[in-house]
Amino acid sequence: MPELPEVETTRRGLLPHVVGRRIHDVVVRNRNLRWPVPRDLPRRLRGEQVLAIRRRGKYLLFDCREGHLLVHLGMSGRLSLVARGEPPRAHDHIDLQLEGRDAVRLTDPRRFGAMLWVRGPAERHALLRGLGIEPLEPEFHGAALRRLAQGRRVAVKHFLMNARVVTGVGNIYASEALFRAGIHPLRSVARISPERWERLARAVRETLERALAAGGTTLRDYASLEGRPGEFGTECAVYGRGGLPCEACATPIRALRQGQRSTFYCPECQR
């Protein structure tokens, strides 16, 4: 699933090609995404100018004069820049045809993505208003995490991946940040000191920034706007390395299941 680094990489790739341009037309080939594409979306967007492209968690917001286009990439979606009129392939569901020769194409094999129109303040939309703090913003620090953890007994990895607490930290990045911070993924948030909260906040930010520099992570379907896979997977210290020696201490990396997710950690480095 595209997580914060992949969505932010997509956003940054779109900026020079889309912001300031008008939408000539919208071609919807399949409305049956996770939430049905509104039937009036072409009418709403036709002639609109894209003023900005923002990200909230794993959602993209195309700010227009009369509202906002909300885009989610779901489990396997991606946006690409193609020539207007380029023949679609099997899973190319929507084209935003821009003035000139370009189109932004939504490809989504599993159809868990979304493209919706939002009137009024976007942050009040049901999909956005309950989201937690952004890990790349200044307000993300140890004291904020400690405050959000008060009264909870959940394992710290589940805490990091709860979008209503911290938005955008997926499974790979939670595992890698916990290794960088030296914190066991099963440790209760009630048993983390203020100093370790600060260490964890730094580790989350550093992990996401490294992933952004690498263009995100490709497991199956994700590719950047230009079609390049994310390369962060080659830098992972623990994720996907079960049984291999820890790069820091040579202890074999262990794997366990937390909920429906695989968790990787070093039993020596993480306590």
Image (cartoon, helix red, strand yellow):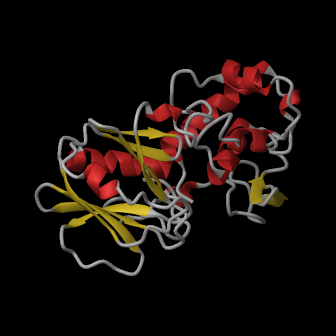
In the image, 270 versus 212, the foreground residue is: 212
Q: Position of residue 49 (x, y in %)?
A: 21, 42
Q: Position of residue 41 (x, y in %)?
A: 34, 55
Q: Is residue 156 left or right of residue 76?
A: right
Q: Position of residue 115 (x, y in %)?
A: 43, 55
Asked if 62 appears above or below 93 in the picture, the reply is above
The residue positioned 68% from the left and 34% from the top of the image is 165
Asked if 48 appears above or below 51 in the picture, the reply is below
Q: How many marks?
A: 0
The residue positioned 51% from the left and 55% from the top of the image is 232
The residue positioned 25% from the left and 79% from the top of the image is 87
Q: Is residue 266 left or right of residue 234?
A: right
In the image, 40 versus 169, the foreground residue is: 40
State the residue lying farthest toward the left: 100
In the image, 197 versus 36, the foreground residue is: 36
Report the quarter where the N terminus lies: bottom right
Q: Is residue 162 left or right of residue 137?
A: right
* Residue 206 visible to the viewer: yes
Quadrant location of residue 200?
Answer: top right
* Residue 211 visible to the viewer: no
